[in-house]
Structures are given as C-alpha cells and as structure tokens.
Image (tube, grey):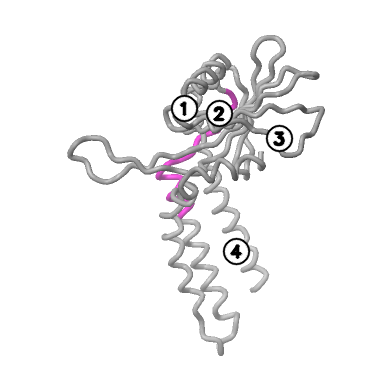
C-alpha cells in the first residue's frame, strides 16, 4: 500500500487531513502558553496546573467531537464487497469476487488531498474544498495469470483512473513500464473503456460516495481515539510526577 500513496499524493494539494483538523489544533494550541514557567520555581508547582489544564482541554475536545458529529460503527460490507477497517491506521481494505475465479482487493487511503473549486451560482463567491481519496484496485485471476492494478482517484461523486499496472507475481522486474497517465485528454477514450471494466466489477461512482462517507466517519473515530490516547498519556505522566 505504501508504495503507491506518495505517487498519488503528488498530484494534489496539501493533505486534507491537516485541513480537517485545523480547527481542533487551534483550540488545543492555547495550551502551549502554559509551558511558559518560572525557571527558578520547583517543577512540582508547575506540572500539576499544566497537566490539569491539558486534561481539561482534551476532555472538552473529546466531548465536543462526540456532540458535534458523533461517529457511528464502521460498515463491514458494501454491495458485494467485505470491508475491513484498520483502527489506528490511515487506510482500509475491501475484498470481493467477480465470477468464479476473479479476486478483487481494494486498498483505500483516508483523505490524502483536495482541490478548490468555485462555489456554484452566478452570485456566489469563494471556493469549495473537494476532498480526494486514493485507492488501488487489484484484480487477480490466480496462479499463472498476471494481475492488473488500477491506481484511482475517488472524488465525492466519481471515479478517475490514473494508471494501470500489469504485475507478474512470479517474476520481479526492475523499473517496469507502468503505462500512460490516463488523466490526459488524449487518453480519455481508454479511460472510459477501463472505467466500464471496473464498473462491471462494482468499482464505480457509487463506491466513491460510500468511501467518502466511510472515511469522514473514520476520520472522526481516529481523531477521538487519538485525543483519548493523548489524554491517557498526560494523566499517567501526571501520576508519575506527583
């Protein structure tokens, strides 16, 4: 999974995960002022107020996240695919079958980029943020057949194929030819044909809608878990210092 994510990310604006957490970071940033203390005072007199305020800020943030947009239990299936979440990681895996012999595996990142588009309407000003998800679709027919891998972009309402790789699991090739960038205008007909191929296997615009809903929920779950982990560590440090 790690081998394709950096390639996909270079095509987009800075990571959307930073955009999604900016408001949280700004609320927590106020705690940094508590780090300024009198160097001549004892450490005991300053660690307790500091940790107490950090714990309070983290507790308030966790409560806010639960109240503002409470996450729900992640889906375990979508149409003919099974869904396997990876708690604490920035991706998940889907698996399915097509016909009797074809195995389909989809590896999906959390939001890894965005673009800015004008707001609709003649009188509208400003821009909307459109989030991006990368996915790798691996189609295998089993031993003796090369695999096809599709590097794709999942936008909120449509799928875009970037590249198609042909992989021979039985033979390692150094610096293999990886095909054209299918997003170029002259490759649109080929992209439509390959898009129909994926559509028939359930990798389509409907899947993109599901993935954006899924990753929005996962983003909230991971954030709340991360805040809870930080709070737990600070509480443990405070107990050691007392």
Q: Residue at x 67, y 70 (%)?
A: 240
Q: Earlier in the sequence, mark 3 or mark 4?
A: 3
Q: Nearer the viewer, mark 4 or mark 1?
A: 1
Secondary structure beneath dot 3 equals: loop
- Residue 189 vs 46, above or below: the answer is above
**Hey, which quadrant is residue 127 in on the image?**
top left
Tell me the CA gap for discs 3 and 2.
37 Å
Q: Earlier in the sequence, mark 1 or mark 2?
A: 2
Mark 1: give few (<14), some (14-19) or many (20+) Cα within 10 Å: few
Residue position for label 2: 75
Q: Earlier in the sequence, mark 3 or mark 2?
A: 2
Question: Whole-percent x and y of residue 157?
Answer: 42, 28
Residue position for label 3: 176
Mark 4: give few (<14), some (14-19) or many (20+) Cα within 10 Å: some
Question: Whole-percent x and y of residue 28?
Answer: 46, 61
Please state which of residues 209 and 61 is positioned toward the viewer in this rendering.
209
Q: Nearer the viewer, mark 3 or mark 2?
A: 3
Residue 69 is a magenta residue = yes
Task: Please identify the residue farthest to the right as the structure is shown.
Answer: 170
Secondary structure beneath dot 2 equals: loop
Tell me the CA gap for discs 4 and 1.
56 Å
């Amino acid at each position: 999974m790690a081998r394709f994510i950096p390639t996909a990310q270079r095509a987009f604006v800075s990571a959307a995960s930073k955009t999604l957490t900016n408001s949280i970071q700004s609320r927590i940033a106020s705690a940094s002022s508590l780090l300024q203390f009198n160097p001549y005072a004892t450490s005991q007199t300053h660690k307790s107020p500091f940790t107490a305020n950090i714990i309070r800020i983290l507790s308030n943030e966790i409560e806010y996240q639960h109240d503002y947009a409470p996450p729900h239990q992640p889906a375990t299936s979508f149409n003919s695919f099974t869904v396997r979440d990876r708690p604490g990681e920035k991706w998940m895996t889907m698996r399915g079958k097509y016909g009797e012999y074809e195995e389909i595996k989809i590896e999906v990142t959390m939001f890894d980029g965005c673009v800015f588009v004008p707001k609709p309407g003649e009188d509208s000003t400003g821009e909307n943020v459109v989030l991006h998800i990368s996915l790798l679709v691996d189609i295998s027919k089993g031993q003796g057949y090369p695999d096809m891998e599709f590097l794709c972009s999942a936008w909120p309402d449509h799928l875009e194929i970037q590249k198609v790789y042909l992989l021979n699991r039985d033979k390692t090739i150094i610096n293999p030819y990886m095909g054209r960038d299918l997003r170029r205008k002259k490759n649109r007909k080929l992209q439509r044909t390959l898009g129909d191929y994926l559509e028939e296997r359930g990798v389509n615009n409907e899947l993109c809608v599901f993935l954006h809903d899924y990753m929005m929920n996962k983003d909230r779950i991971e954030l709340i878990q991360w805040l809870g982990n930080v709070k737990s560590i600070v509480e443990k440090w405070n107990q050691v210092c007392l």
